[in-house]
Amino acid sequence: MSLTFSDRLISRLTNAQSVVAFTGAGVSAESGVPTFRGSDGIWKKFKPEELANFEAFMKNPELVWEWYSARKKIIANIEPNRGHHTLVRMEQMFPRFAVITQNIDNLHRRAGSTNVFELHGNIERNYCTKCGTPYTNEEVLTQAGVPRCLKCNGLIRPDVVWFGEMLPEDEWEQSVRAAESADVFLSIGTSAIVYPAASIPLMAKHQGAYLVEINPEPTPLTDQADEFLMGASGAILPELYARLVAERQLQQLP
Ligand code: APR
């Protein structure tokens, strides 16, 4: 049975010049990437304080690398899902469209999204903690044990944002700019509790964006949302896109 969408949502999207999709782990759940706080979530099994912060890394780099190497290999063998692919089509539908993601899995880019801002880094990139030299996964996963920099022998780390670390400045600024100029802001598959990323949807709402949340469960953001679409993003996004295409044909819009 096809989903129904409110006339207000369809008219807001049909007339939108600028649309933003803000994504979290939920958008990759249907690809097989575990979320962080779901019933089988990563943080239910592992301690973030032992694995996702710099002090823990410097104290026990073997343990942290073992964990990230496993995640890199899992993610390398996973494919984007219908949710990711629909956001690629939406990028072609709207004059301005951006994906702001908290995900480090690179699945938006692998699906074909081009205007992507990565707030928490990307698991396919690495760099030397001493001299900053960048390394690809191919270069680090071929080294036995904890990979070391070929230039300065420093420890190499994944280019992801760990707890207590600053977000990448450029990605943050571009995300704030996109959020503040959005006509419609879609918050998709995030529990909306990890700051400062979780402040981005509120900035958009504050600037007048029509705030839509897509999630199988309500979150602390739901009360602020103009619409809550309850369900999986891999099911809702393709239907929403199809409805928009039908509306454009109806209105004979390009
Ligand atoms: N479609 C849409 N949403 C889904 C789906 C799905 N198929 N499956 C689960 N969800 C929702 C869950 O209900 C939950 O609200 O996705 C959300 C995932 O929340 P988290 O696991 O907390 O992930 P996220 O919000 O991305 O976490 C934010 O926390 O651990 C850090 O740096 C990490 O980027 C991460 C940040």
Image: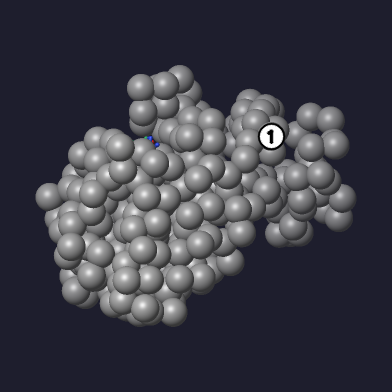
Residue 179 in sight here:
no
Q: Position of residue 43 (x, y in %)?
A: 42, 27
Q: Judge left or right: residue 40 versus residue 5.
A: right
Residue 66 in sight here:
yes
Q: Quadrant of ligand 1?
A: top left
For this orientation, the residue located farthest to the left is: 223
Residue at mark 1: C-beta within 8 A of ligand 1:
no
Q: Residue at x 85, y 37 (%)?
A: 142
Q: Judge left or right: residue 10 versus residue 112.
A: left
The vertical placement of 89 against 249, above or below, is above
Element type where label 1 sits in the image: loop
Q: Position of residue 31 (x, y in %)?
A: 54, 36
Tell me the residue that label 1 is attached to. Answer: 77
Q: Residue at x 83, y 46 (%)?
A: 139
For the C terminus, give its image quadrant.
bottom left
The vertical placement of 159 against 191, above or below, is below
Q: As rendered, which of 170 and 243 lies closer to the eye?
A: 243
Q: As rendered, which of 46 and 59 lies closer to the eye?
A: 46
